[in-house]
Amino acid sequence: MARPLSSSAAYQWSIFPEHENDLGRVVNVAQVVQLSPFRYPGGKTWLIPRFIQWLLSFPGRPAQFIEPFAGGGIVSLTAANMQLADHVTMVELDPNVSAVWQTMLSDHAEWLANEVANFDLTVENVEARFKAGAPTIYENGFQTLLRNRIFHGGILAPGSGVLKYGENGRGIRSRWYPETLKNRILKVATLRDRITFINGEGIQVMRDNAHRKDAVFFIDPPYTAAGKKAGSRLYTHFDLDHEELFRVTATLAGDFLMTYDDAAGVRDLARRHSFQMRTIAMKNTHHAEMKELLIGRDLDWVGTQASKVIE
């Protein structure tokens, strides 16, 4: 029997009527509590109701929640904010994205929040700020967050550029909400005692913690299984050994939930390791409905009518 839901988790879960055994319905992300300041390709806001359901299916609260590929961090932030685990460990390889997290989870969080709130967002000021360089982690954090909010699709990989038109012709201001971003940064700062952040290699952190029965892992590699060409358009660090990731996942003593694009190669890897799979509906950044895979050892917590296990 799973423990009772905390009041915050109970509310978050109750506002999603589609949680009743229906993975085919797309979650209305406007109902999800937004905690991350990032716009992130492949972000998992749409998965949050299922993520909460998964963690609440355990008989007790996990001692450690580990996200090896944190990216925009909405899943880890949800776990920390709702206290769905005793402690949360976030891992991110990209040094620029890491700079944002390191700043928000440090004494420089208030500086970052105020810098965002007070920055006069013009093309000229942006160019001058980037030209000045980033001699500190917290300045790098600000510039990375700035790029994330004003570049096409939030994409930070080389070749991405500044929005020209944006929403309603607002250009670079289309995704720049200073007060909202400030509040999110300050909210993240309040969670710092519950979160450990590692700028490192996610699979290695999985290896280091594979023996822990009291740890659970949310594995969402920010790399497309379609190959390097597609991955390189979205992420600076896109090259991943998918077979090694599945091999290491199979060694974990604790439970895990993995999400992946629905591709034949991914299904083959999951079958090879005797993992279960379910399809789940989501929308991409262009609002097109798509299917992703949920992968785990035991997905009975989803519900028998949710979707058929893929054979």
Image: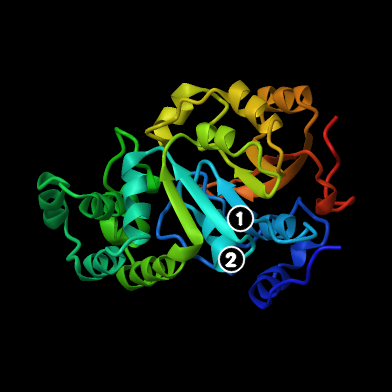
Q: CA distance from mark 1 to mark 2?
A: 8 Å
* Count of numbered badges drawn on the protein: 2
Above or below residue 168? Residue 234 is above
At 38% from the left and 72% from the top, the residue drawn is 183
Q: Is residue 51 left or right of residue 109?
A: right
Above or below residue 5? Residue 46 is above
Above or below residue 79? Residue 44 is above
> Which quadrant of the structure image shows residue 11?
bottom right
Q: Are marks 1 and 2 in contact (CB under 8 Å)?
A: yes
Residues packed near mark 2 inside 10 Å, few (<14), some (14 to 19) or many (20 plus): some
Task: Return the disc, 1 or 2, that comes first in the chain's sequence.
Answer: 2
Q: Position of residue 36 (x, y in %)?
A: 45, 60
Q: Is residue 307 left or right of residue 188?
A: right
- Judged from the image, the secondary structure of the residue bearing numbered disc 2 is loop
Q: Which mark is residue 32?
A: 2
Q: Which mark is residue 46?
A: 1
Residue reaching furthest to the right: 304
- Quadrant location, the N terminus: bottom right
- Quadrant location, the C terminus: top right
Q: Is residue 237 left or right of residue 256?
A: left
Q: Position of residue 216 (x, y in %)?
A: 66, 48
The three-letter amino acid code for the residue at tag 2 is: Val
Residue sitting nearer the eye, 244 or 253: 253
